[in-house]
Amino acid sequence: MHVIALLLSVVLIVVCGSTAIADLLHNEARVATLRRLGLRRGTEVQVGVIKLLAVAGLLVGRGSGSLSVGVAWFLFAYFMVATVMHRRVHDSWKTSSLPLAMGIVALLLAFSA
């Protein structure tokens, strides 16, 4: 189970890390998506920092231990809220599928760590 938890952690680290960098660098596509979701200007930095903190927690926890489980549950909630927000503004399932998939990965990590 440790190997599975480690692989799931790596997936979450890559996805959260890359999107956090895009948020912090004010990537135009990310900013446009956040505006479409109804978030106000400047929120992308806060979202990016939250994701970086989650990445740090996953790196410190290294796929096992209570820190990884706590971060996994947080990320599950985060990605489920993101999925609901995308569906609320009538985004396609293609757009909503990434946060939904990452939420499932986080849930799997919570139960495998």
Image: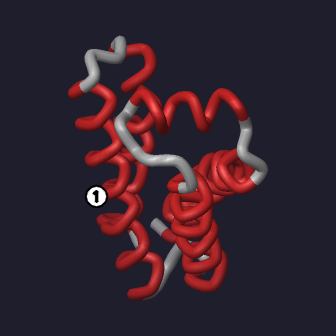
Task: Give the farthest residue toward the front.
Answer: 41
Q: Position of residue 98 (x, y in %)?
A: 46, 31
Give the side of residue 12 with respect to residue 91, left or right. right
In the image, what residue occupies the spot 65% across and 54% down?
Answer: 20
In the image, what residue occupies the spot 37% across and 25% down?
Answer: 96
Q: Quadrant of the rendered structure where residue 90 is?
A: top left
Q: Quadrant of the rendered structure where residue 49 is?
A: bottom right
Is there any visible trace of residue 111 in the rendered image?
yes
Is there any visible trace of residue 7 in the rendered image?
no
Indicate the secondary structure of the residue bearing disc 1: helix
Q: Position of residue 86 (x, y in %)?
A: 33, 29
In the image, what residue occupies the spot 58% across and 75% down?
Answer: 53
In the image, what residue occupies the spot 49% across and 79% down?
Answer: 64
Query: Can you say which quadrant of the picture contains the N terminus?
Result: bottom left
Residue type at numbered disc 1: Ala
Q: Is residue 21 above or below residue 50?
A: above
Give the side of residue 77 with respect to residue 35, left or right. left
Q: Which residue is mark 1?
A: 77
Q: Quadrant of the rendered structure where residue 32 is?
A: top right
Query: Can you say which quadrant of the picture contains the C terminus?
Result: bottom left
Return the residue nearer the eye: 64 or 55: 55
Return the residue nearer the eye: 87 or 100: 87
Return the residue nearer the eye: 70 or 6: 70
Return the residue nearer the eye: 93 or 109: 93
Mark 1 is surrounded, within 10 Å at the Cα level, by few (under 14), some (14 to 19) or many (20 or more) other residues, namely some
Q: Position of residue 71 (x, y in %)?
A: 42, 73
